[in-house]
Amino acid sequence: MSRTPREAERDNGTQGEESIFDLLTAYHRSLENMKAWLDEAGFDEVERMGIVDAWQAEMSEWFRSKGYCFACNRRLEHCHCDAGRPPH
């Protein structure tokens, strides 16, 4: 009999940690909020790009703090992309 992801988390002692699916759900919710806010704000294109760039940097750090790479969505210990490596 196969286990559910939540059962596997419980058995592996990772219960309570957020899964990549939880992070991506929060990311997409935040993205929709950001889009709505930018649509309502009176920023020019350069200001909008700066805000989006800063938001993406914050999201990248948030993913890292949760143990995932923002670029490839893998656990940091399994990430091989340049984006997943800590800055020098």
Image (tube, helix red, strand yellow):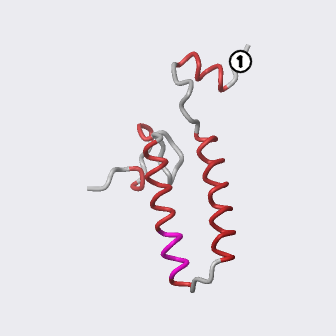
The quarter of the picture where the C terminus appears is: bottom left
Residue 31 locus on image (x, y percent): 63, 61
Is residue 76 rendered magenta in the image?
no
Q: What kind of secondary structure does the magenta stretch mostly adopt? A: helix
Q: Does the magenta stretch include residue 48?
A: yes
Residue at left 47%, top 49%?
62
Near mark 1 (Cα within 10 A), the count class, few <14, some 14-19 or many ≥20, is: few
Q: Residue at the far front: name it.
A: 41
Q: Mark 1 points at which residue?
A: 2
Residue at left 50%, top 55%?
59
In the image, farthest residue toward the left: 88
**Percent x, y for residue 24?**
62, 48
**For the point 66% across and 26% down, which residue is it?**
5
Quarter occupied by residue 33: bottom right
- What SS does tag 1 mark? loop
| Three-letter amino acid code of the residue under disc 1 | Ser
Q: Quadrant of the N terminus?
A: top right
Residue at horizontal 50 percent and vertical 54 percent from the top: 71
Would you identify the image quadrant in which residue 82 lies?
Answer: bottom left
Is residue 2 positioned above or below 39 on the image? Answer: above
Report the span colored magenta: 47-53
Provide residue 55's location: percent of width, then percent of height. Answer: 51, 63
